[in-house]
Amino acid sequence: MSSGKAPYSEFCRAEYVPLQLQPWWLDAVCNADRWSAVLSYDKGGRVRGALPIFLTRRWGFPVIQLPPFTTYAGPWLVYPDNPDFKENSRYGFEHQVMASLIAQLPRFAFFQQNFLPEIQNWLPFYWAGFHQTTRYTYVLPGTGYTEDLYKNLKNKLRTDLRTAERETEIVREYDPGLLFWLNQRSFNRKGLRQPYRRAPFDKLHAALAERNQSACFIARDRTSGAPHAALYLAYDTRQATLLLSGFDPVLGRRSRALHGLYWQAILFCAERGLSLDFEGSMEPGIERALRAFGGKLTPYFQVWKAGNPLLAATIGLLRKS
């Protein structure tokens, strides 16, 4: 499965393409032989749109889905550099490019991707029989004015941040065993199983670290040095995302350490002029915590289609994965 990888890699070298759609990211989380891409060209042979795909198998059926540790996939478009490009022309361009990408998709029994928040037109997918569910994240714009951000925080959150600063010291270090253990404890606290394996994360971290595009922060007890919480950021020249986090249900809850790490991530991004996508959960408790930091509620589309009637009864199960 490699027919579109070479031109897609060239496309990513020539144009800005978001972090989670980069070929080296996909190599890490999918393995190099498990992903490909389809591309749409204009009359001059220039790539105007691309859609990377991770094709795997579920119950023996071919399925296109999100790779591990990857929140967004879907199409990415490069618009003509034309100051007279009107809205009508923009929509027509999007429809033409997306229709071309859809027509090139390999046969699948089920398709599910989360489109990037920048992609707000999914009509061509609707016309092709796909379905859509709107989901939400919180995004803080890139800014260096952290004093204004702090003033806009809820009073309770400012109290939590003072507690975290008093109880813990935030250090920048990477300890994969500790990070995964804290993340696992966060899931176990809710009676859930950790939904991913460490091996692809280690490969992704190696790729990010090689490019100096990651930061891991750990909140440690100021007295004993015991870990209270950890947070892992991945970023490019425009935006950072919260890739992984976790906290000790006893120590971290008492010290509000995860809130302290969120604030550290905000400071890290503000210093570099990066926007921060919290990649927020739709779970009410997590949403409430992320909302308190003042990010903008930002919709994105989860687009899916059952290409095989035999999977109709299992669509609900697949869409939770």
Image (cartoon, helix red, strand yellow):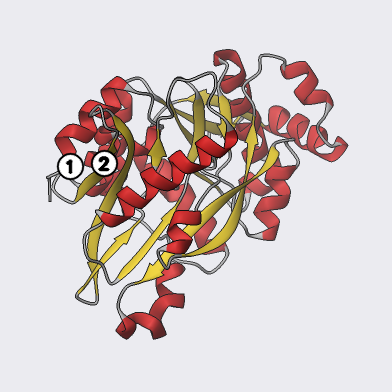
**Depicted 257 relative to depicted 316: above or below:** above
Which of the 4 image quarters holds residue 140? top right
In the displayed structure image, the side of residue 17 where residue 7 appears, left or right: left
Work out whether residue 193 or residue 272 is closer to the camera in this orientation and state it: 272
What residue type is disc 1 on?
Answer: Gly
Real-space CA distance between mark 1 and mark 2, rounded to the nearest whole angstrom: 7 Å
Quarter of the figure with the C terminus: bottom left
**Residue extending furthest toward the right:** 155
Helix, strand or loop status at disc 2: strand
Viewer can see residue 313: yes
What residue type is disc 2 on?
Answer: Leu
Looking at the image, which residue is at 87% across and 36% down? 155
**Mark number, residue 156:** none
Q: Position of residue 166 (x, y in %)?
A: 72, 28
Which class describes the residues within 10 Å of circle 2: few (<14), some (14-19), or many (20+)? many
Which of the 4 image quarters holds residue 312? bottom left
Tag 1 residue: 4
Which class describes the residues within 10 Å of circle 1: few (<14), some (14-19), or many (20+)? some
**Depicted 274 relative to depicted 220: above or below:** above
**Mark number, residue 39:** 2
Looking at the image, which residue is at 51% across and 36% down? 90
Q: Position of residue 167 (x, y in %)?
A: 68, 32
Work out whether residue 308 or residue 248 is closer to the camera in this orientation and state it: 308
The reply to whether the C-beta atoms of the residues labelled 1 and 2 are less than 8 Å apart is yes
Work out whether residue 280 or residue 94 is closer to the camera in this orientation and state it: 94
Q: Earlier in the sequence, mark 1 or mark 2?
A: 1
**Depicted 197 relative to depicted 145: above or below:** below
